[in-house]
Image: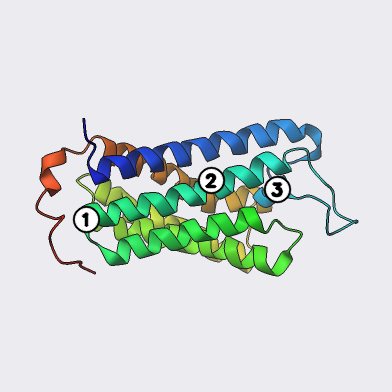
């Protein structure tokens, strides 16, 4: 059976998002007493000390860095197939930028401070914006939830950048930015997998939209 573009995108996004969430949890378990979810940044899981002798190298660094790079790769490929299905440049562009950000986080851990901060901002910001823009391609009721999820993630990002941790620590606050979009990615993937294939047969030849 030949799969439609949206189903291929759904499989890629579901596996990529679910796989990274699982890898991040395992990374936290591996690091045990060396890592505190409330007080450590998420990216502390990916730190290694090849370029910085004063840093603390955590056992999870390979698992975290590889898994977030693969997440970014999955987002990039998923956005390509979503573009083929829905022909929406704006949404697909936002999504692929968030994928590039995730790949950059994996390639440039915290040891590369400037690059890491830039790519982290890219993945968080464009991931939230993609969730907002997804309302144009989603069915009800997910198209109601997606903008709320995206706006919540961006609001938490603003608080995080401004230094407000709302009493849950920098790690907890960063997770308020990351988890909504990651879980939305799982939901979007499942949504696309379940989509009836014939609905978008006419969109494949339609001109791209913004």
Q: Name the residue under label 3.
A: 46
Which quadrant of the structure image shows residue 36? top right
Sequence-wise first label, 2 or 3: 3
Reply above or below: 183 against 80: above
Q: Mark 1 points at which residue?
A: 86
Sequence-wise first label, 2 or 1: 2
Q: How far apart are marks 2 and 1 (CA)?
A: 24 Å
Residue 32, position in %: x, y?
A: 76, 32
Residue 18, position in %: x, y?
A: 47, 36
Which quadrant of the structure image shows residue 184? top left
Left or right: where does residue 16 sit relative to residue 193? right
Residue 198, position in %: x, y?
A: 11, 41
Sequence-wise first label, 3 or 1: 3
Residue 87 appears in the figure: yes
Q: Assign the N terminus to one quadrant of the image.
A: top left
Front-most of 1 and 89? 1
Residue 64, position in %: x, y?
A: 65, 43
Farthest front residue in view: 2
Q: Which residue is drawn at 40% across and 45% down?
A: 185
Q: Assign the C terminus to one quadrant of the image.
A: bottom left
């Amino acid at each position: 059976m030949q799969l439609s573009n949206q189903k291929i995108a759904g499989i890629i996004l579901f596996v990529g998002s679910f796989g990274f969430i699982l890898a991040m949890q395992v990374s936290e378990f591996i690091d045990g007493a060396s890592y505190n979810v409330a007080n450590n940044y998420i990216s502390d899981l990916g730190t290694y000390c090849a370029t910085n002798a004063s840093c603390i190298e955590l056992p999870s660094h390979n698992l975290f860095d590889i898994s977030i790079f693969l997440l970014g790769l999955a987002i990039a490929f998923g956005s390509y197939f979503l573009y083929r299905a829905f022909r929406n440049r704006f949404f697909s562009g936002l999504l692929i930028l968030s994928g590039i950000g995730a790949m950059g986080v994996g390639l440039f851990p915290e040891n590369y401070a400037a690059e890491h901060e830039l790519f982290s901002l890219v993945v968080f910001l464009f991931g939230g914006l993609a969730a907002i823009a997804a309302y144009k391609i989603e069915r009800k009721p997910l198209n109601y939830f997606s903008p709320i999820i995206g706006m919540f993630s961006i609001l938490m990002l603003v608080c995080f950048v401004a230094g407000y941790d709302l009493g849950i620590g920098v790690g907890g606050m960063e997770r308020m930015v990351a988890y909504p979009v990651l879980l939305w990615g799982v939901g979007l993937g499942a949504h696309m997998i379940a989509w009836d294939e014939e609905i978008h047969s006419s969109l494949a030849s339609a001109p791209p939209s913004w």
